[in-house]
Image: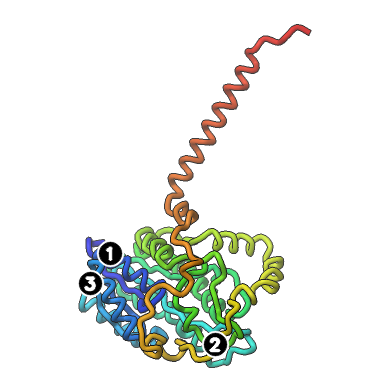
Amino acid sequence: MNGRPVVVVTGASAGVGRAVARAYGERGASVALLARGTKGLAGAAADVRAAGGRALELPTDVADHEQVYAAAERTEAEFGPIDIWVNVAFSSVFARAVDVTAEEFKRTTDVTYLGFVYGTKAALERMLPRNRGAIVQVGSALAYRGIPLQSAYCGAKHAIQGFTESVRTELLHDKSDVHITMVQLPAVNTPQFDWVLSKLPKRPQPVAPIYQPEVVARAILHAGDHPMRREYWVGGSTVATLAANAVAPGLLDRYLARTGFSAQQTAAPRDPHQPANLWQPADDEAGHDYGSRGAFDDRSTNRSMQLWASHHHGWIGAIATAGAALGIKSWRRLRRTARQRPRSAG
């Protein structure tokens, strides 16, 4: 990869995508920004340029494959070959499955699942002939574990997981130097809770522990640098959720049935007039740029020990091995000392 990588970020106008775009800007990257909202795109472009990178605003609805392919074409015309493609864009509905309309399920699937498919295909069609490049799928613990009130989103994330595994095996079969990886996220403090279409009685909220988008942006950049690893998990809560689901999914079903409704709602009533970005970009509807962070700063952390451990698993393994070796050596020394000690007369 050259010193000024060319990066495409979908969903770049706010939240995690916005934080990722800014982080690549800090590296001096040339960043193509794909999203629908013009106010958010302008804000993201300003962030990238202020950080030291180059920015290209590309108003795009990722549910439309022609728009996605045109954005890829424009990126390479303006910046050159794409090195990294990061799929982030999503939509969702907070509601019981019976209260989500067929049109809302379809729209969520078109954006959250097919948007990743179209982005991946646009990247592969350009990367495969060059035999280099990385695709990063921004997933969620909900790609493995469904929870109540988010059936549309969970279904789409599960679909992304299966699609990505299929593509990965094809690339491995071809011994390609194009790589695809997935980053599974925990709850993140993003503006989505102010604009996701909600039919809940109370204001939606992320389930604690909550991480700042900059934490996950660091993980996504690391994944782009090391895409040979099949998957990254961010946050101890993600690890705990996936481990519990693997060991005792039935118990987790009952636990989520008991706690999942209240944990995803605050005590405050939902604002019936809040914008909903399922059909229209929320930043343009609300008339302002939302940025990367949501309304839960006071409950969010900017650190993840699990993420650090994930990035340094080689060092941790070496330290653990050295510690085990030292323990065995000490134990053997104690055994020798015990054997050599004269026994007292009986």
Under circle 2, the secondary element is helix
Q: Nearer the viewer, residue 102 or 265?
A: 265
| Residue 159 placement, left or right of 83 | right
Amino acid type, label 2: Phe
Q: Position of residue 38 (x, y in %)?
A: 32, 86
| Residue 115 placement, left or right of 157 | left
Which mark sits nearer the N-terminus, 1 or 2? 1
| Residue 78 placement, left or right of 69 | left
Location of residue 72 with respect to 255 vertically, above or below: below
Q: Nearer the viewer, residue 296 or 31?
A: 296
Q: Position of residue 214 (x, y in %)?
A: 40, 65
Location of residue 284 with respect to 216 vertically, above or below: below
Residue identifier under label 1:
26
Q: Quadrant of residue 33?
A: bottom left
Residue 105 numbered tag: 2
Mark nearer the viewer, 2 or 3: 3
Amino acid type, label 3: Arg
Mark 2 crowdedness (10 Å alpha carbons): few <14, some 14-19, many ≥20: some
Q: Position of residue 51 (x, y in %)?
A: 26, 67
- Whole-Å distance between the Cαs marked 1 and 3? 10 Å
Name the colour scheme.
rainbow
The answer to whether residue 300 is seen in the rendering is: yes
